[in-house]
Image (cartoon, rainbow, N blue to C red):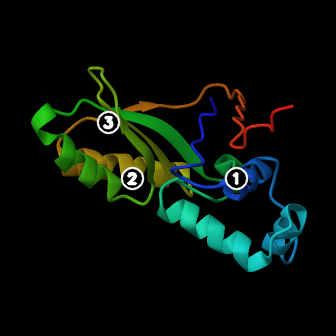
Amino acid sequence: MNAFDVHTHSDRIDAALIDHLHEGFPLSDRPFAEIGAALDLGEEEVIDRLQKLLATGVLSRFGPLYQIERAGGAYLLAALQVPAGRFDEVAAQVNAHVEVAHNYRRGHRLNMWFVVAGESPSAVDRCVAAIEAETGLPVHCFVREREYRVELRLRALAPEPT
């Protein structure tokens, strides 16, 4: 069984588009036209399909990933121990910061985990201090010591039966 349900979420063209985008994004003046040419689609159809995939939640994000340290920025993994009755309130406070991404709940004493990224290490520190002041909870900061690259690609389009 294919993990991507093309019948309820999308069609085979969307699946092919997702698979194609996993292979890379063209750096050109008309990247969507280039993608469309590879898939026998028009530029506008590629853009329309991507917008639909984002709007329906099939894709949660479409954009580049940067190594922020190369541009002078910084990020860290952070965690909070949030009382169960305050979880939604604290999540809203934390998520209100543009520096915060990937906030999620875990079944652990530290039940809220998120990433803080900023244009500088001091910007990250200011964001963490603001979250502590707003929530009244200590933020546990986990700075990266070593980077590992793990890439997992799951095909959206099932191969044709032979």
Residue reaching furthest to the top: 108
Q: Amino acid at mark 1?
A: Arg
Q: Residue at x 30, y 25 (%)?
A: 110
Choose between 134 and 25: the one closer to the eye. Answer: 25
- How many numbered badges does the structure rendering display? 3
Label 3 vs 2, first from the N-terminus:
2
Work out which quarter of the rendered image holds the C terminus and state it.
Answer: top right
* Vertical position of residue 52 compared to residue 65: above or below: below
Which one is in front in this view, the residue at disc 1 or the one at disc 3?
1
Q: Residue at x 84, y 62 (%)?
A: 39
Residue assigned mark 2: 126
Q: Amino acid at mark 3?
A: Val
Residue assigned mark 3: 139
Task: Give the class, few, some or many, for how many residues have Cα within 10 Å of label 3's Cα (few <14, many ≥20).
Answer: many
Residue assigned mark 1: 12
* Vertical position of residue 84 compared to residue 22: above or below: above
Give the CA distance from mark 3 to mark 2.
12 Å
Give the CA distance from mark 1 to mark 3.
44 Å
- Image marks 3 and 2: residues in contact by CB distance under 8 Å: no
